[in-house]
Amino acid sequence: MKEVLWKLVGEDFQILMSADKNIRNRFLYSGVIMLLICLISLIGFTQLLFLMFNHFPIIVVISLFLTWLFFNIYKLCLITLSVRAKIYNIGYVFSLLIRVVFISFMAIIISKGFEYFLFNTVFPYFNFQSQIGFILNAINELNNNVPGIWAITFLTILLIISPFIIKFTVKPDDKYFSIQENINREIILNNYEDFKSLYNQEFLNNFSLNINVKEKFYDPPFNKSPIIDKRVYGTNKDFLKVFEIGED
């Protein structure tokens, strides 16, 4: 069960098995939260669709698709989030801000559907008069009749973005991230070596030419340290002097 929950948050369970118990538990909590997010999303989308039209089979199919789509986008945002950035530059902050804004916006939509389900179906203490097809009227009626409804919305948003917060609570220099980075680096280097070998083999087999990949960086394929050409080139006048010498 732990492996399934770790996979839900996109972490390497093989590496987590050798990580500290504290780290394993944090990502385990994230996995449980991801399950809750899926459940709340499914209920929220289903309720919102019921407010738009009344056709149960279609609603179920669309709700499952929207939940699956949101879950995968959410998981992609979480997986591609790097907490080992040495410098939080403008690009990194902007990327993080886009993720948080998008997830929060979707959380509000999901939360409103979930809230309407709670107070109209589970706890029907309020007599909502909204009709099918008037989704904005239904949400407005919910906001006006349920005291403290925005507190529930805020808590739902906090729940949905909490896996991001949990990931940031893990220290960037933790053993788990170090092992993960080393393994990923080794995979990349091995694949790059296979590519260079295949590149050379294709030229040998098809054209009988021994051609290798020309490296322009000291650390391919990461390409962070360019090879600087220190040769000194002459000017056009230097080039013309060669012909002048030949004529003499």
Image (cartoon, helix red, strand yellow):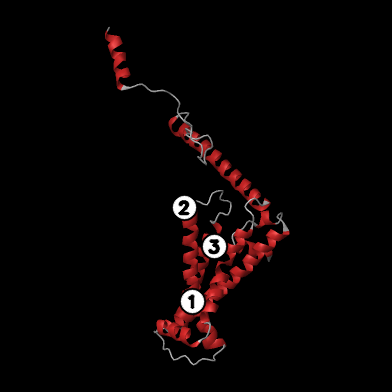
Residue 191 vertical position relative to residue 165 in the rendered view, above or below: above
Residue 93 vertical position relative to residue 116 in the rendered view, above or below: above
Q: Residues within 10 Å of mark 2 (few under 14, many from 20)?
A: few
The Cα–Cα distance between marks 2 and 1, rounded to whole angstroms, is 33 Å
Q: Which amino acid lies under the numbered mark 1 shown in the image of this protein?
A: Phe
User: x, y (%) of residue 96?
Assistant: 50, 58
Q: Is mark 3 in CB contact (under 8 Å) with mark 1?
A: no
| Mark 1, residue position | 45
Quadrant that contains the C terminus: top left
Q: Which amino acid lies under the numbered mark 3 shown in the image of this protein?
A: Lys
Residue 2 vertical position relative to residue 92 in the rendered view, above or below: below
Residue at 47 percent across and 90 percent down: it is 128
| Label 3 element class | helix
| Label 2 element class | helix
| Mark 2, residue position | 91
Q: Is mark 2 in CB contact (under 8 Å) with mark 3?
A: no
Quadrant of res 138: bottom left
User: x, y (%) of residue 198?
Assistant: 51, 38
For the residues carrying marks 2 and 1, which lies nearer the camera in this image? 2
Residue 143 tag number: none
Residue at 48 percent across and 35 percent down: it is 226
